[in-house]
Amino acid sequence: MPEIVVRKYQAGDEKGLTLLAREVWGSTFGEDYWRWKYLQNPLHDNFSYVAVCNGNIAGFVGGIPWRFVVRGKEAVGGQMTDMMVHPDWRNEGFFFPVNRKSLDDMRSQANFEYGFTNPVSSRIYKKRFRYEGFNPVKMQKVLNIKSAVWQGLRQGKSVKLSTLIDLISRVLSGRKKVSSEKAIPLPTNLVVKRIERFDARFDELWGKAHKKLKIATIRDSRYLNWRYVGHPQLHYTIFAAEENGELYGFVVLRCENKEGIRKGLIIDLLVDPDQGPAAEILINESLKFFRSQKAAVINTWMFEDNPIYGLFVQNGFSAKPVDELVVLIGSSSPDIST
């Protein structure tokens, strides 16, 4: 058996990771994606390890440090990402040693670690590492049921009948909720502008908004510009709500074609907690944008204790627990409890 070397990810591994991701996932991400994610992130650090065999990367476990606010205090959270093993090496038993290296590195520098996984992997992590698991809620609004069904049917076997049935039930449910809720009048003094970059005003907005959040990634201008403006392959559309130049909130949007259906994604939404109408007007602007992009369905994800959860329901979004996605959180820090 050839020797397998486990070491930390380093500059120059991007080509090997691109080839591995293409083999494992059919990914189209290029070398610039790995540099952006693991070397150019806001903290310019990572907890990532590779398994090298005969000069080629056969396995990878990614980890990224993020600045968080947890109950009003700043902390570092390590996110577990991009776990890959080449199909030819999946029975060689080196995944857990690579994963252990990443976790040990993460735990030595971060206050807690977390990741997004599926039910099978979550059971392993809960048993092996005693992690806690939480299911987010998928909020969905069907803009055009005829288009959604037609797009799905055109894909034939690539879309499940259950998906189409679920869409129909959601649109009916959403209409009932909208008709039973009192509409919130939109303020006329707020304007929404499309922006290309996040300036210093977004630092001030974060300073106000984070006080109402129990736990959240610190979304200052440095993070936002890296995450949404600087992404090497994905394009995001950003709208800001303001009054006389004073910023009250923003929303980040993206469209994708998945399961044969054109979907609109609300990726991020943050508002000044003292300016509640800003969230309403940004959601309305999102609906308008997605209609212009011919999206049949809009999706976003959150937890039910999110302050704007009810606002999405009022706007016709239906909620469904995402059983196939689990957020895992583990901590060995006495200051962070799960």
Image (spheres, rainbow, N blue to C red):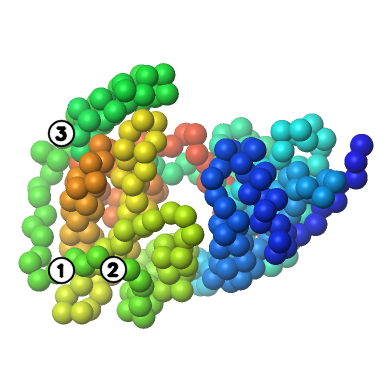
Check disc 3 and report the residue beneath it: 176
Q: Residue at x 34, y 51 (%)?
A: 254
Q: Residue at x 57, y 34 (%)?
A: 119
Query: Element under label 2?
Result: strand
Q: Nearer the viewer, mark 3 or mark 2?
A: 2
Percent coordinates x, y for residue 271 in the rendering: 29, 66
Q: Quadrant of the N terminus?
A: top right
Callout count: 3
Relative to the observer, which residue lies in front, 21 or 171? 21
259 left or right of 133?
left
Q: Residue at x 41, y 19 (%)?
A: 157
**Label 1 with label 3: CB-CB less than 8 Å:** no
Relative to the observer, which residue lies in front, 322 or 288? 288
Q: Quadrant of the C terminus?
A: bottom right
Percent coordinates x, y for residue 65 in the rendering: 60, 64
Check disc 2 and report the residue beneath it: 195
Q: CA distance from mark 1 to mark 2?
A: 12 Å
- Indicate which disc, 3 or 2, sits on the residue closer to the N terminus: 3
| Vertical order, 44 against 168 (above or below) | below
Check disc 1 and report the residue beneath it: 191
Residue type pointed to by label 2: Ile
Residue type pointed to by label 1: Val
Q: Nearer the viewer, mark 1 or mark 3?
A: 1
190 left or right of 297?
left
Q: CA distance from mark 3 to mark 2?
A: 35 Å
Disc 3 crowd, CA 10 A, few/some/many (<14, 14-19, 20+) = few
